[in-house]
Amino acid sequence: MRKNDLTAMLVSYRSGNMARKIVLEAICLFVYKYPGRIYNWKEDDCSDFFSYFYPKIERMIDSFQIRDVPFEVYLVKTIKLQIKTFAARKTAEEVSIKILKNKELWPYEKIINSSAAGNDSVCEPPSCPFADFFQDILARDLSGINRENTLKKRLLMLALKSMHCSAENEIFRISDMLDCDRKWLSDAFWQLEEKRSEKKNKKVFLQNRRNRHFCRLCLLHESFHSSLSFEEKEQLYLKIAKEKSSIDSITKKIDMITDEPTHQDIAEVMKIPKGSVDSGLYYLKLYLENY
């Protein structure tokens, strides 16, 4: 298509000597081929850009004022501006999809099973059902009724701490064995489940927020490596450092969130001091090591 062909066609259309459809098809063909001809884009990318640009073509046909500047110049200038916007958006989407589909690219994705406060760790939940596990422990020869009551209280702490790992239908059996009210234990279970759900939602929120920072970090790295300006590289370096700092800060908050109830959660449900839960689970751990 020779220079000024589109302008001539547009003038002819405005004069009523050419159908709008013919002008529209010529402009569409020009827009479709432009990225491949100038920037060596692949056919798929040219098609994507054309789909992105197409809604603007009819508005351009109606709004362009035929004066000294040819329509081709106006069209090329608009295409170049839209290519920058389209390319930036496409790159961001590709990076986001790549990150979401490849978890190995996610930073700091190791699972923290223990809380930041070391005293919240306790023995691993037994693989057998909790009710049977407790029954085996209580069936042992215990010396003295006081020791039995203390053990039951500590087992109750363990049951509350690991309730999310046990089946809901075990609640009644556990309550009978540990001499606690069924309704109280059921209510305690749901209170801890609500707390656990809140923590899970908060963790997901923070993870999504961190991933957005990671996407921006990837884009900044790409811009840094492609930039030829020292001043621009310096500004990008500062932005990269800021994004890394944000990721580290959010990761620390995520690491503080545990999936299981904390000792403070159990203390609030049982209405006892947190120190009693700390010591109770600690001595239970020592007891079970010899079990």
Image (spheres, rainbow, N blue to C red):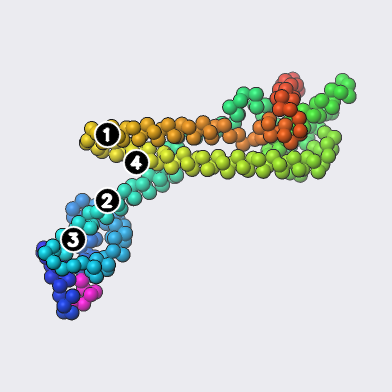
Q: In the picture shown, does residue 215 fall above or below 30?
A: above
Front position in the image: 169 or 260? 260
Q: Quadrant of residue 215?
A: top left
As shown in the figure, which amino acid type bears the numbered disc 1?
Lys
Give amino acid for label 4: Leu
Measure the C-alpha gap from mark 4 to mark 3: 31 Å
**First in sequence: mark 3 or mark 1?**
3
Q: How many angstroms separate mark 2 from mark 4 (CA)?
A: 15 Å
Give me the disc on residue 89: none
Q: Nearer the viewer, mark 2 or mark 3?
A: 3
Q: Is residue 22 magenta?
A: yes
Label 1: element kind: helix
Residue 102 shows in this picture:
no
Please, what is the three-letter code of the amino acid marked with disc 3?
Answer: Tyr
**Count of marks overlaid on the render:** 4
Q: Position of residue 217 (x, y in %)?
A: 38, 38
- Residue that appears at 28% across and 32% down: 234
Q: Which residue is mark 3?
A: 74
Q: Which residue is labeled 2 in the image?
A: 84
Residue marked by disc 1: 233
For image coordinates 45% across by 41% down, the residue present is 211
In whole angstroms, how far apart are the C-alphas of marks 3 and 1? 33 Å
Q: Residues within 10 Å of mark 3 (few under 14, many from 20)?
A: few
